[in-house]
Image (cartoon, rainbow, N blue to C red):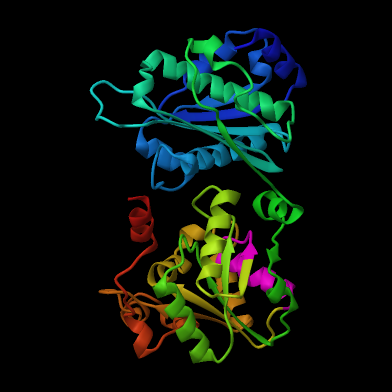
Amino acid sequence: MNTEIIEKINAVGRKAFLTITGGGTSFIGEYLSHSGGSKTIGGFYVPYSQALFDEFVGCKPDSYANQDAANKLAMASFIKAKKYFGDNAIGIGGAFSLVTPNERVGREHKFYVSVQTMTRLVMYSLTITQDMKLNREQEEIIASELIFTALRDEVFDKNTPVGHEFSWKEVINVDIVDVNVEIINFDDRVTNLTFGPTPVMYGDTFLKDTSDSFLIFPGSFNPIHDAHIQMMQIAEKQYNMPGYYEISIQNVDKAPINVSDLNNRLNKILESGATRGILSNTPTMYEKMKELKTLKKYKQKLVIVVGYDTLERIFMMQYYKDIDFNTFIGTCFANKVEFFAFGRKGKKVSEYVNTVLPEMLRPLVKFTDETDEFNLPISSTDLRKSCRN
């Protein structure tokens, strides 16, 4: 690392939190060995255990060494950095798959670094093949230099980062391919959705809708599939009104959805033929109900489409830390909210309602013979695995 550049970075005083896995740990020791390194590096985390990785980002990724993994680490790092260092903080995630002893023939070595801030996501990637004959030490140097480049580009606020502008040959005495860089700049809506302190909902058709009643289908839709589409169609037919798919950037149990991932999900929804959607930062049912009422989006009835697992969570006390559970229930009755529920194989809505729910809560849950044990042999998790393979 260039000492002069490190001194310039530290002089700016922007704090970063760094989380890396699979390689690149030499960056931490080397950067902090320079005087003043703590002016920039506010903290770091190395979750080599997959369980620790999952806990940190709030979900189990499809892969621990791809760009999405780096994005998730960067977002979780930024949330932590923002909490302690303010809106100007930097979150950096690194996910690496470096050379190992006796590895299979043809295995590629992957390098991914992502930088998350309030205003953009920058993604760096690099692939090295076995025929380059690099050892672990050399690849560790590359990983470290890639992290350093990403930090430097962000601190110096380059609009077009070029992660390969230094000479790799000077670092490891080997020429390698260029680094790929992708930048996603956020508009005000995305910033408000992802990091804003107040509830917001966006959607062109949604904001213009003046219907007295409203039907929404909240979910992660990662990705949307035939079961989702059929559930929406059944609900629309049952209530004779058009429905809206709603994705919340914020999640009760996870870090916010990163913008790259969100774009992919939205494109899949559009490809499915859906034309009505809502983006929000309202992770709980109570917050959705409140914001929809604030926007005067329903006067007579609000119907919320839910699957069986979501139905169970609605009535779990652990999701009501900030409000009293009775306040939530009272709001549902007062605002004529219904949960139109879909069961799944072996999990009937009728059995849950009649044996688990207290009698006073049962009027909130509606279902039909068709939805009581609704089942299609497909899931978003399986689809993600098939796409990865």
Residue 176, image x, y percentages: 49, 22
Left or right placement of residue 337 versus residue 225 in this view: right
Q: Residue at x 63, y 26 (%)?
A: 151
The region drawn magenta spans 279-296
Could you tell me residue 24's position as x and y percent? 47, 22
- x, y percent for residue 204: 71, 71
Point out the image quarter for the N terminus.
top right
- Name the spot of residue 315 as percent of width and height, x first: 45, 69
**In this view of the protein, which residue sits in the foreground, 125 or 281?**
125
Q: How many marks?
A: 0
Most foreground residue, 355 or 132: 132
Q: Residue at x 61, y 27 (%)?
A: 163
101 horizontally vs 295: left or right:
left
> What's the residue at 31%, 76% (across, down)?
375
Q: Is residue 333 above or below residue 13?
A: below
- Judge whether 295 appears above or below 92 on screen: below
Can residue 37 be found in the magenta stretch?
Answer: no
Q: Can I make out residue 130 in this image?
A: yes
Residue 363 seen in the current view: no
288 displayed left or right of 108 = right
Asked whether 181 or 228 is in front, the reply is 181
- Residue appearing at x 34%, y 25% in the figure: 130
